[in-house]
Image (cartoon, rainbow, N blue to C red):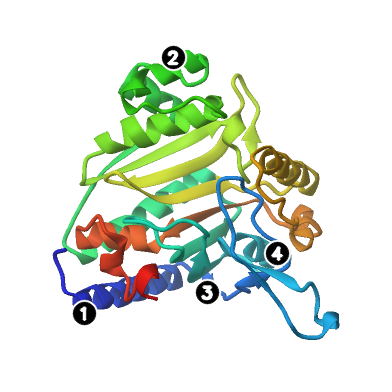
Amino acid sequence: MTMSPRAALELRARLYALLRAFFAERGVLEVETPILSAAGNTDANIESFSSTFSGHVDAGARERWLRTSPEYPLKRLLAAGIGDCYELGRVFRNGEAGGQHNPEFTMLEWYRVGWDHRRLMSETIALVEAALAMRGRRAEVVVTSYRQLFLDGLGIDPVHASIDELRAPLVEFGIGPEGLGHDDWLDLLITHKLQPMFPRDRITVIHDYPASQCALAKIRPGEPPLAERFELYLGRYELANGYHELNDAAEQRVRFERDNVVRRGRGQREIPLDENLLGVLDAMPDCAGVALGVERLLMCLADTDAIADVLAFPFSEA
């Protein structure tokens, strides 16, 4: 590590001040939403912590879920007309512990009304550039589509390639094929082959993902249809994931239920849907939103590959 524990805490404090100033200058309101919810995250690749409320039954559902992001309550605020907003706060993901992951970490998430994912990409780049400048650093910016990334980096067309063609570059890793589909192999190619090639002093932004990877993003019709989302990397670290947000409650319910089908197939517990969100999602204005992992950004600013170096106390010592 290049800095002392005290210096790491000071860096975090300086970054928080920079983030708040960044959004204050742009008129984006800081808000605070619940950490415990009666609904959880249905994404089969994310596991939530749950807890049990012991108070009076009239208070609501006894089982509560620690949020994996503030996305759902922020969208409820948007539907209520709050306008551009952001939250900087703790989130929790069960099972994610290791050299670069901590089950409790800080997420910055913000929403811009009337914007699409392409416009929000530019603001996310500006924020990361401002954070780098705080450390006297600059970075080259490369913006590419998901499809072009694969064509340039691997000579593979992710839209038309067969699973065998996707597996071939990964043979050295000895990954078993059981239970892995087309999108899983695409993800593995990014994490194992493409991401490690990203230069340290480069911001890489990938946009327009396959429709099958839409998550909570709108899908743009075409051949092929594309999910209007982006991911931003600093060096080889993924920092941010953004969407031109879906505001169709019926379609969102279908996606949540599809997630639970995947969870059942993997032997995971089904997660209760966020009915509070679904009840107002049709009223949410057209907008774009993005979530950024603060520890990931701090790791890049501190020149360390260990998340413990930017935490006061890692999970093993908490």
Label 2: few (<14), some or many (≥20) within 10 Å? some
Q: Nearer the viewer, mark 4 or mark 1?
A: 1
Residue drawn at point x = 51 percent, y = 54 percent = 290
How far across and down, in percent of the image, does residue 247 sit? 71, 49
Q: Amino acid at mark 1?
A: Arg
Q: Nearer the viewer, mark 4 or mark 2?
A: 2
Relative placement, left or right, of 184 versus 205 is right
Tag 1 residue? 6
Q: Nearer the viewer, mark 3 or mark 1?
A: 1
Q: Is residue 107 visible?
A: yes
Residues at circles 4 and 1 in contact by the CB criterion of under 8 Å? no
Q: Earlier in the sequence, mark 3 or mark 2?
A: 3
Instruction: For mark 2, give the secondary structure.
Output: helix
Tag 3 residue? 30
Q: Amino acid at mark 2?
A: Glu
Query: Vertically, is 264 above or below 145?
Result: below
Q: Quadrant of the C terminus?
A: bottom left
Q: Amino acid at mark 4?
A: Arg
Tag 2 residue? 165
Q: Amino acid at mark 3?
A: Glu
Q: Earlier in the sequence, mark 4 or mark 1?
A: 1
Tag 4 residue? 76
Between 220 and 235, the one lying in front of the other is: 235
